[in-house]
Image: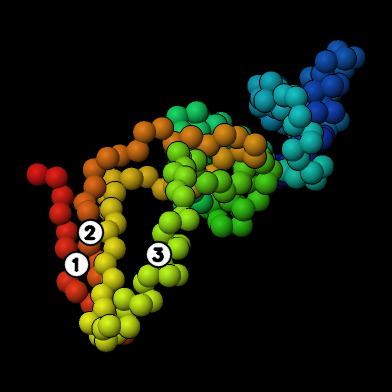
């Protein structure tokens, strides 16, 4: 007695949708439909079980007709999930960057079981314009300074004072603050979005930097902080 070898037949998404439409018409039995498409009864049962997923709105646009697997849908799932996370993060004024988007996209992919997904630089760069995301400066209160007096002193009085000393003996010192707990001043945000960062961290160190005019001597940094 000879046994007929069973062949495995993969149906495209479009074909599966046509099959489901035929089932819905109820003009043929499930056995007849399975024979028409050349698939065993258990494969037909699996397709019917996944009917809701296959018939969800927009699916036909997510696939090319001849695609057998739903890789496009997986990437769209990551895209939409990342954009949802992005909007939630921006409601909390969290500063965002490309590395943060990359890390979060790969984390979402792992949660969805997509082990082969890699959030490349190109993928992130395409993700941003799709959702109107651009790099914006986080606004802060701008201090307005009248430079009229200082400019007049620099142009009229300072040159005569400098002539009395050698360049090696003229030092310029500048005080600056190191806000070592501050978040970045720029963030990825939606175009047109007002970027506010909330209260900034106040922990800081004050640093005094000094060097002579000729550039031959730099004084050691003086650093102070709150006790």
State the residue in front, 208 or 162: 162
Give the alpha-carbon distance from disc 2 to disc 1, as whole Å: 7 Å
Q: Which is more N-terminal, label 3 or label 1? A: 3
Q: Which residue is the site of mark 3?
A: 153
Q: Which residue is the site of mark 1?
A: 221
Give the alpha-carbon distance from disc 1 to disc 3, as whole Å: 28 Å
Q: Is residue 174 visible?
A: yes
| Residue 31 on image: x %, y % | 79, 22
Q: Is label 2 in contact with label 1 (beta carbons under 8 Å)?
A: yes
Q: Is label 3 in contact with label 2 (beta carbons under 8 Å)?
A: no
Q: Which is more N-terminal, label 1 or label 2? A: 2
Q: Is residue 206 left or right of residue 6?
A: left
Image vertical order of residue 87 relative to residue 118, above or below: above
Q: Is residue 84 left or right of residue 13?
A: left
State the residue in front, 145 or 48: 145
Counting other residues with Cα less than 10 Å from the Cα at mark 1, is it few (<14), some (14-19), or many (20 or more)? few
Q: Secondary structure at mark 1?
A: loop
Q: Secondary structure at mark 3?
A: helix
| Residue 164 on image: x %, y % | 27, 83
| Residue 178 on image: x %, y % | 28, 53
State the residue in front, 190 or 3: 190
| Residue at 79% from the left image edge and 19% from the top image edge | 30
Counting other residues with Cα less than 10 Å from the Cα at mark 2, is it few (<14), some (14-19), or many (20 or more)? some
Q: Which is more N-terminal, label 2 or label 3? A: 3
Image vertical order of residue 162 relative to residue 97, above or below: below
Callout in the foreground (1, 3):
3
Q: Secondary structure at mark 2?
A: strand
Circle number at residue 207: 2
């Amino acid at each position: 007695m000879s046994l007929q070898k069973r062949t495995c037949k993969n149906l495209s998404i479009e074909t599966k949708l046509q099959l489901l439409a035929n089932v819905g018409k109820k003009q043929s039995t499930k056995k007849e439909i399975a024979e028409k498409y050349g698939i065993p009864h258990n494969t037909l049962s699996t397709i019917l079980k996944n009917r809701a997923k296959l018939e969800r709105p927009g699916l036909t646009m997510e696939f090319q007709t001849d695609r057998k697997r739903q890789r496009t849908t997986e990437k769209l799932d990551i895209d939409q999930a990342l954009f949802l996370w992005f909007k939630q993060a921006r409601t909390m004024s969290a500063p965002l960057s490309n590395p943060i988007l990359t890390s979060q996209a790969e984390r979402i992919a792992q949660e969805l079981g997509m082990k082969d997904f890699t959030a490349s630089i190109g993928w992130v760069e395409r993700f941003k314009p799709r959702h109107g995301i651009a790099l914006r400066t986080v606004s802060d209160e701008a201090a307005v300074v009248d430079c009229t007096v200082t400019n007049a002193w620099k142009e009229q009085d300072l040159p005569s004072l400098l002539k009395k000393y050698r360049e090696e003996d003229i030092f310029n010192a500048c005080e600056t603050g190191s806000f070592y707990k501050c978040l970045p001043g720029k963030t990825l945000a939606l175009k047109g979005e007002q970027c506010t960062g909330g209260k900034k961290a106040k922990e800081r160190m004050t640093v005094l930097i000094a060097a002579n005019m000729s550039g031959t001597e730099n004084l050691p940094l003086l650093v102070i902080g709150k006790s």
